[in-house]
């Protein structure tokens, strides 16, 4: 269950408090479609938040993990700090009144997106062909941000979504689809497949930020606490497979958001 937090940690709120109290900071960690359950993730969540509260000098911090988008959107618990995958942050940061604070980095961060085909197939040859993916991000995000306009997944290909990347790759191997869209994590796993040598990457997008840590209003000490957390609470970060938190590049993040504007 250690993987539950890092790869996703996301939230959506429709109504949230203006300021988070320094005596008890509430989090909602949400990964729509992610693995596991709230109960399974809770011990890891608790350990992470306890270490973060100590680093920030808060009285306490509490929170839960959910992989249900409806629960994210309901804003259950009135959390004041959230961690969102990039695509959900760009889509909802205005409506949910989020202020970006930091980016989360880890060994599973999906910072780039890739088009993988059988060797000898060009990107141009995929026009109108069936392509599969297990990536939950929207077509608009993949087209305009993930592939920076070099591939319109709504128009250039016939994209369908499946439950797992392995299913998509097996369909590619069998010739059911002409290509698959993968993120970094899924692409790295290719090496373990018996048919990996027959595949190649024909397009990769630019490197993107990982999960976005955002606050609703002011949360005292959040940024500095995140930046220094993994150098002090190494076991917590190792258990979550987090390598660290980096200060946000607000200008770069805003530029990515503009790409989603029609």
Image (cartoon, rainbow, N blue to C red):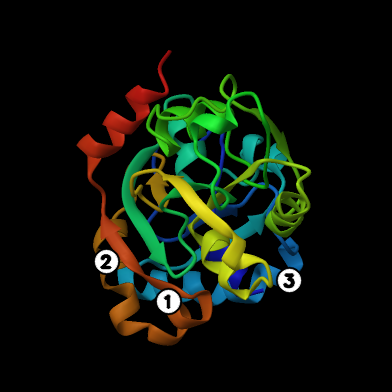
Which circle marks residue 3 in the picture? none
Q: Residue at x 75, y 62 (%)?
A: 37
Tell me how far mark 1 sits from mark 2, CA to CA: 13 Å
Q: Residue at x 33, y 43 (%)?
A: 100
Residue 57 visible here? no
Residue 2: which quarter of the image?
bottom right
Tell me how far mark 1 sits from mark 3, CA to CA: 19 Å
Q: Earlier in the sequence, mark 1 or mark 3?
A: 3
**Residue 76: percent from the left, percent from the top?**
65, 43
Where 174 falls versus 46 (above or below)?
Answer: above
**Would you name the residue on which mark 2 appears?**
227
Name the secondary structure under disc 2: helix
Q: Residue at x 64, y 58 (%)?
A: 65
Name the secondary structure under disc 1: helix
Tell me how far mark 2 sits from mark 3, CA to CA: 27 Å
Residue 103 visible here? yes
**Residue 30: percent from the left, percent from the top?**
60, 51
Which circle marks residue 40 in the picture? 3
**Residue 5: percent from the left, percent from the top?**
56, 64
Q: Residue at x 76, y 46 (%)?
A: 175
Quadrant where the C terminus sits is: top left
**Would you name the residue on which mark 1 appears?**
51
Q: Earlier in the sequence, mark 1 or mark 2?
A: 1
Q: Nearer the viewer, residue 135 or 89?
A: 135
User: Residue pushed farthest front?
Assistant: 120
């Amino acid at each position: 269950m250690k993987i539950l937090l890092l790869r996703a940690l996301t939230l959506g709120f429709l109504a949230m408090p203006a300021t988070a109290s320094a005596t008890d900071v509430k989090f909602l960690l949400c990964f729509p479609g992610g693995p596991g359950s709230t109960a399974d993730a809770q011990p890891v969540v608790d350990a992470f938040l306890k270490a973060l509260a100590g680093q920030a000098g808060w009285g306490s911090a509490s929170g839960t993990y959910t992989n249900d988008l409806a629960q994210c959107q309901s804003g259950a618990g009135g959390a004041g700090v959230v961690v969102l995958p990039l695509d959900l942050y760009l889509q909802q940061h205005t409506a949910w009144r989020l202020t970006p604070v930091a980016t989360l980095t880890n060994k599973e961060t999906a910072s780039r997106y890739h088009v993988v085909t059988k060797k000898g197939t060009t990107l141009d040859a995929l026009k109108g062909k069936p392509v599969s993916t297990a990536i939950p991000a929207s077509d608009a995000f993949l087209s305009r941000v993930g592939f920076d306009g070099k591939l319109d997944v709504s128009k250039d290909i016939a994209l369908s979504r499946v439950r797992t990347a392995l299913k998509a790759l097996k369909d590619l191997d069998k010739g059911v689809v002409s290509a698959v869209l993968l993120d970094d994590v899924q692409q790295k796993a290719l090496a373990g497949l018996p048919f990996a040598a027959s595949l190649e990457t024909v397009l990769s997008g630019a490197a993107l930020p990982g999960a976005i840590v955002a606050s609703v209003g002011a949360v005292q000490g959040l940024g500095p606490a995140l930046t220094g957390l993994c150098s002090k609470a190494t076991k917590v970060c190792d258990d979550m497979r987090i390598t660290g938190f980096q200060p946000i590049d607000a200008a770069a993040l805003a530029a990515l958001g503009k790409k989603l504007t029609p």
